[in-house]
Image (cartoon, rainbow, N blue to C red):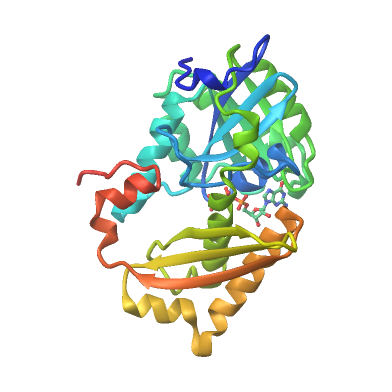
Amino acid sequence: MTMPNSEAATPGGTKCGFVAIIGATNAGKSTLVNALVGAKVTIVSHKVQTTRAPIRGIAISGPSQLIFIDTPGIFRPRRRLDRAMVDAAWSGAGEADIVALIVDAARGLEESVDAIVGRLADISLPRILILNKVDRVANKATLLDLAAKLSARVPFERVFMISALNTDGVEDLKTWLAAAAPEGPWHYPEEDISDAPMRLLAAEITRERIYHWLHEELPYAITVETTSWKELRDKSVRIEQTIFVGRASQKSIVLGKGGQTIKQISSQARQEIQGILETKVHLFLFVKVREGWEGDPERYREMGLNFPKD
Ligand SMILES: Nc1nc2c(ncn2[C@@H]2O[C@H](COP(=O)(O)OP(=O)(O)OP(=O)(O)O)[C@@H](O)[C@H]2O)c(=O)[nH]1
């Protein structure tokens, strides 16, 4: 494995593994990475300063640093942004040390899983299969059946049956990944992991809240940037963020009637950021129209994506 950032080396016996998490929408990728990363929330951003694919989280297990590469769960991309994200996902998978396919065991072998498995066969890297949501499967024999069907399509080094939500089996998975990671220096210095990306994490939290409230009304991607971060004397933190939308009509959707929507988004995002920082947070959100950004290669680069050619 190449080590572009050798300055981050931790001397003696360290391991560092890139794990690409591949799965259909709703398979539980975020829940799993959050469970693996644990209380020590690190990078959970689509926009980390990396030349690799976007990173969803970093976990430390003994001498091993595990870096989870994000894969958006869109496998029928129509828009340019979606295509860029899917391309990033697959190129990320190609650069990883291990590819982990996560499947919603309660839904079984649906079409989207089938499509992913078909493409997985082209990647000549160690693969593992993670059957998630086993808490929702009453008949455990169906799990073995599903594992057998998927393994017949493409061989896996190992099959894990977990519940990311209850964290059942997550520790075993983490221990296995940590042992399987190749020897080498850590890619990210520990202090970088916990400090620098907080601005990105905070932006991501707001973006998630916007999607939560508006995913049906706002089919277009929006971006959020943390523009200011100040620690005040009373130890509280004042954060300013700008939400970029593609059109004026989207701006009014984000604001909502009488500013009600943005108020909800702001309040929930503030509480979540507050929970992570463990200090009082003042969050100020601004909405700006940035027309035509979907056709602007620079914006893609900012998000760590390549601009897809048609
Ligand atoms: N019952 C149960 N629900 C789960 C489990 N893991 C995840 N979920 C739920 O499944 C839904 C989707 O989980 P996410 O982690 O957002 O899935 P994702 O794969 O990251 O989704 P995308 O980012 O949209 O691709 C959420 O409602 C989770 O709470 C699990 O082990 N058991």
Residue found at the far top of this picture: 12
Answer with left or right where residue 134 lies relative to residue 253: right
Task: Residue 190: give x, y in percent of width and height.
Answer: 65, 30
Q: Quadrant of residue 60?
A: top right
User: Who is closer to the viewer here, 222 or 42?
Assistant: 42
Give the image location of residue 194, x and y in percent.
Answer: 65, 40
Q: Residue at left 70%, top 45%?
A: 133
Placement of 150 over or under 220, stated as above or below: above
205 vs 212: above or below? above
Q: Position of residue 273 (x, y in %)?
A: 67, 59
| Furthest residue in direction left, as rendered | 310
* Residue 71 drawn at (x, y percent): 48, 41
For residue 216, side relative to residue 245 (left or right) = right
Q: Residue at x 53, y 67 (%)?
A: 210
In the displayed structure, 98 sits above or below 34; it is above
Q: How many marks?
A: 0
Residue 58: tell me if it is visible.
Answer: no
Q: Residue at x 74, y 48 (%)?
A: 165
Q: Nearer the viewer, residue 2 or 144?
A: 2
Tell which of 231 and 292 is nearer to you: 231
